[in-house]
Image: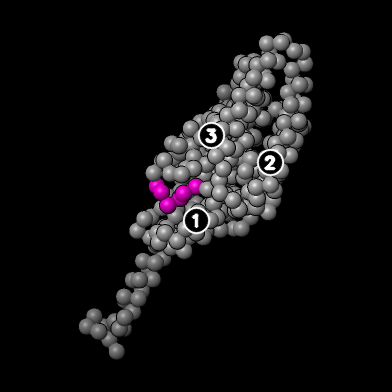
Amino acid sequence: MTDGSGLMNGKPEKFSCQKGEGKIIRGKQVKKILLPAVLWLVFESIAVTLWLTKQNPFYLFNFTYIGTAIAIGTLLVQFHYQHARRAAQLLVGTYMLVYLGLISNENMQIEGFWYYLFTGVFEAATIHYAVAKIFGPLVFGRGWCGYACWTAMILDLLPYKVPQQPRKKWGFIRYITFALSFLLVSALFLAHVNHMERIMFWAFLIGNCLYYAVGIWLALAWKDNRAFCKYICPITVFLKPMSYFSLLRITCDKSKCISCGKCKTVCPMNVDMTDNSRKRINGTECILCYECTKICPKEALK
């Protein structure tokens, strides 16, 4: 049978609906690809700029590699690949720990940053901190903690991916470790200690061993893989203020949210994702793992 237009009953409407749904699906896919593309362009811009200004091809390789690994990891996370973020962590974290740290003898810990800063050298750790931990968080917040940190790379392999206990009010410890790292390097400079490069290398080795030991102990004791990140890590003193203004952040569509609370139960950093304000609980600690978006039954989080 046909209607007044001579077309089969319902077919024009059905075709129109399918076409509309197709556009929506394509729009969602474009949005998923856009984020990784922007992140890659940011890192590639840094790579090319440093390569040309420093006349050193290492920077081109270094930031292209890191940016590509993070972009691929983010892309796969957007399409809900289970181990995508872990893969990015291993690619970037292992590279920085083994190649830059152990092989190239660069102290990429906070002590290395103070050391290069005091010597007035804009290389290695100072560039790393400027990009990833001081100015970068204005764009991607605490994304570095979720996709590239070599300490979290190991801690995230432990069994307590979701905190089993309420968050403790011990965040002040991070400021103590931050101050101690500054005082340590300052004291070495004031004492005019010889062989500072060698000392910084050993500080990198010992510091990482301490980070892993304390991090694993806290994770097992408090049943929370990210306990070290929440209470001890001195790097967060740099990350938190800038992350407050981050351009990249997960938001909640209040019209879709049913207040089921599932997003809060899976967040490794205890962030209240249902609050869109900048002052939301633990808002500066989101590591962009997107676990909340995966579990949301109404796709209210994006």
The residue segment tinted magenta is: 271-276
* Three-letter code for the amino acid on which mark 1 is drawn: Cys
Magenta part, dominant SS? loop
- Marks 1 and 2, the one that precedes in the sequence: 2
Going from N to C along the chain, the mark reached first, 3 or 1, is: 3
Q: Is residue 222 above or below residue 241?
A: below
Residue placed at 65% from the left, 47% from the top? Answer: 222
**Residue designated by label 3:** 239
25 left or right of 172 in image: left
Q: Earlier in the sequence, mark 2 or mark 3?
A: 2
Q: Is residue 275 magenta?
A: yes
Q: CA distance from mark 3 to mark 1?
A: 23 Å
* Residue 250 vertical position relative to residue 45 in the rendered view, above or below: below
Q: Is residue 100 left or right of residue 179?
A: right
Judging by the rendered image, the residue that carries numbered circle 2 is: 215
The residue furthest left is 4
Q: Which residue carries the number 1 mark?
A: 263
Question: Is 299 situated left or right of 150 in this image?
Answer: left
How busy is the neighbourhood of tag 1: few (under 14 within 10 Å), some, or many (20 plus)? Answer: many
Residue at the spot x=52%, y=58% of the render?
Answer: 294
Which circle, 3 or 1, is nearer the viewer? 1
- The x and y percentages for residue 139 are 48, 38
The image quarter containing residue 21 is bottom left
Which quadrant would the N terminus be assigned to in this image?
bottom left
> Circle 1 — which element?
helix
At label 2, counting other C-alpha atoms closer than 10 Å, the crowd grade (few under 14, some 14-19, many 20 or more) is many
Magenta stretch encompasses residue 218: no
